[in-house]
Amino acid sequence: MREFARLYAELDETTATNRKLDALQQYFAAASPENAAWAVYFLAGGKPRQAVPSKLLREFAIEYAMLDEWLFEECYQAVGDLAETVALVLPPPENESDVGLAVWMEERIGPLRGADPATVREKLLAYFNELTARERFLLVKLIGGGFRVGVSKLLVTRALASMAAVDSKLIAQRLMGWTDGSVAPTATGFLRLIAEQSDDEHKLRGGQPFPFFLAHQLQGEPAALGDLAEWQVEWKYDGIRAQLVRRSEQSFVWSRGEDLITERFPEVAAIRVPEGTVIDGEILVWQGSALNSGPAPFADLQKRIGRKTLSAKLLAELPAVLLAYDLLELDGVDLRALPQHERRALLQTLVRDAAQPALQISPLVEAESWDALSTIRMESRARGVEGMMLKARNAQYGVGRTKDVGTWWKWKVDPYSIDAVLIYAQAGHGRRASLYTDYTFAVWDDDEAGERKLVPFAKAYSGLTDAEIAKVDNAIRKTTIEKFGPVRSVKPSMVFEIGFEGIALSTRHKAGIAVRFPRILRQRFDKTVDDADTLDTLKGLLAAAHE
Amino acid sequence: MGDMVVVRKEGLFCVPGNFYIDPWRPVDRAVITHAHGDHARVGHGHYLAAAPGVDILRSRLGEITIDGLAYGERITHNGVTISLHPAGHVLGSAQVRMECGGEVWVASGDYKVEPDATCAPFEPVRCDTFITESTFGLPIYRWQKQQEVFDDINAWWRKNAEQGRPSVVFAYSFGKAQRILSGLDASIGPIVCHGSVEPLNRVYRAGGVDLPPTVLVTDIDKAALKTAMVVAPPSASGSTWMRRFGDYSDSFASGWMLLRGARRRRGVDRGFVLSDHADWPGLMSAIQSTQAEKVIVTHGSIPTMVRWLCQQGYEAKGFDTEFGDEDESTAPEAKEMKESKKAAEETTPDAPEAADA
């Protein structure tokens, strides 16, 4: 734990990639395989389920610190992070210990899950009493299930690759599925992760997916990409990126976040494809009949994601399909080094032969010229898609967001935008703790009495630079009307242009609509509050989206 | 009798004495607790300050009419006996003791209770009412021992020097900079001070404070910079002045660096937690040592401290002042903006800056 806490602190302290890499290499060089296995799990983004509810954690920390609850709450508001607050308010420990990360996870933290509160209390207070502030911070993070490290998976891969003297693409491949939580990290697993390349690499893969190939945002005009004939064009869908893996007579469905989602989408898992097949595509809720069908809004997919148990009714109402757009493995052979167009041809044959309703192929968009394509792209909203994907005809299927073996571009349509008024603000967390960075925006609407008032319709926290945030933060403090806990209502005075990707009806929101991916495009210094848009304008966008 | 000290639009006002303490608008008579910009402003008719702070005030405010009072020396003004007592914040910082009709009030200004080689240590003064600051008035704020911080700074400097990279520590030029200098191990390499720090070093040295040798960047060989420690105000960060140091490692020294969020926002390699304000235990011990029954809380965590003190049996309330920041906790950013604005407006190297934190 001590070494991992030091590694965490070092990664947290610096923004320099080289120093992070140094710290990782030093850690892995010294760590025992069982501890290193858990470290990889966390560094690669593994999130264990919460072992102790935050409420209890907080309660026992308050008891140990001998603070009033309100005072602890004040502290939490200033810090913006529970683990850090706990680490800062607890008095120094009386004992010390140096127990390895694996023992902590397996013998100390693991058993807390589901234990009765009295046991949890006794254990926690004892643990607090043997750890330094830095280690307590980590303990609370590990127990609370909200652990995040400021390091990219790519960097972890590089550190492991250089330590093991193995190609980093191979490490990336072996890392797939490490963090899904179905298998506990072990010393054996770690040794296999850093072992030399072997002939049965493929056999060892089990039900693991391939690292997803990610697209880059296209900046500027596509004509700069050269001859259109060199590009494979498809629609860009707003669903769940997923791989369907069929190996060892079993099907596995993996999300891009490397979560195993097989059980969430039984109709996708039930797609019959030959042994040794991996398909990359998008899971979507499909609506309408065969003639006039298309992807349902993301909100419908969300209804599927949100449910723990899937009723027959829900499955019938919101059927999911896998819209296939790439073939990564066929007959147990890795196809990723084949050019895009060859993989596409094989995919078309496979989908046609499979003839399964839940397996559709992502249609190609054909056009004579980039200009013609631009015109077709204007149908995006009506089709319920986000724009287009441009895939180099000769692109291999790369690892992650790379351009070294050919490129995928996403050519999205411009977001919807609307001018809205900032009415509530809340302090952020982490890097933005005690800065007002989370805003609620409103548009005008007439109430029953015909009175014009502001109705909140979206929250947004991204899009402003640090300098802009500092100014808005300042203005919020000066125009505060009321404080409700961490939230402030402010005198409506600032207008922002808010961008978003989609819009749908919602019964859960006061305004009756919900927008997708809202973010701040810019502050409109040229507009007064009265110039902000109305709810009718927003509803107009809704109508347009469904035409 | 009503309160001896009240808040007016000009500042804290001693009613029977008819004078102000650290007023933020021009007044006739001002007692100044210390020379940071939010406490000492230009435009008052007469200034009274602790003798060790007089030269600093002059260097920062220019031509002013000022009297210096030795720590502990008493004078009487309109029937109020005034004396100044060390606050341990920066050189010349003072608490203001006011006695009138058998009642004693003390206004702390800014203070810390931890020893600091660059100024006289905080002196607890018995009083009936204590006016305390609350910059770090939350239990999360507990400082490491000063020596440990100095050891960390020196170790970091040594490591950088071994790798041939200059070390830059950003610190407020008055107070924090000299305190850091007093803790540096000059055997590691040369110490370079920014043009806004060096004039204050001179005043400190003239006041008998022992500081290691320092040079201006124009007085040092470029090759020697590789092992140098550079002490500069936060406003120098990102300025062209920094370019000459090439590939340097930077750090920021402030109490705010205790929080990860503030540290990460700052974007420096290291955050050293070093403050010239009292931490939570320091505030509590200082309040206790005055034996006051009434406590008035100014700038910082006013509502929290007031509620806590009331729970502890004090008669406590808050004063809204224009010291420190206009709001609880965001200090570094808010100050930074003020500072960089000032830096842009004023080109003199020793332009006064906002308060230390």
Image (cartoon, rainbow, N blue to C red):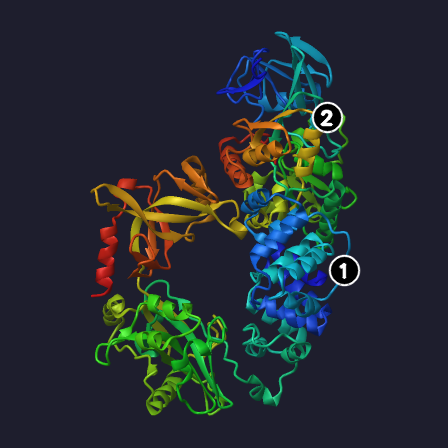
Horizontal side, residue B36 vs residue A445: left or right:
right
Name the element at disc 1. loop
The residue at 55%/87% (across/down) is A202
Q: Please, is residue A331 above or below residue A174 in the view? A: below
Residue A97 vs residue A173, the one in the foreground: A97
Residue A421 vs residue A195, the one in the foreground: A421
Task: Report x, y in % for residue B201.
Answer: 69, 31
Task: Report x, y in % for residue B338.
Answer: 51, 35
Task: Report x, y in % for residue B343.
Answer: 52, 34
- Which amino acid lies under the numbered mark 1 shown in the image of this protein? Ser
Horizontal side, residue A120 vs residue A528: left or right:
right
Horizontal side, residue A279 vs residue A175: left or right:
left
Give the chain of mark 2: B
Task: Report x, y in % for residue B287.
Answer: 68, 29
Occupied quadrant, residue B45: top right
Residue found at the far right of this picture? B187
- Callout 2: 10 Å neighbours few (<14), some, many (20+)? many
- Callout 1: 10 Å neighbours few (<14), some, many (20+)? few
Q: Please, is residue A60 above or below residue B32 in the view? A: below
Horizontal side, residue B50 vs residue A538: left or right:
right
Give the chain of mark 1: A
The residue singled out by tag 1 in the image is A97
The residue at 70%/63% (across/down) is A1
- Which amino acid lies under the numbered mark 2 shown in the image of this protein? Pro
Q: Which mark is residue A295?
A: none
Name the element at disc 2. loop
The residue singled out by tag 2 in the image is B124
**Cα gap from disc 1 to disc 2, whole angstroms:** 40 Å
Occupied quadrant, residue A192: bottom right
Q: Is residue B270 visible?
A: no
Number of numbered discs on residues: 2
Locate the C terminus of chain A and report the quarter of the image it occupies: bottom left
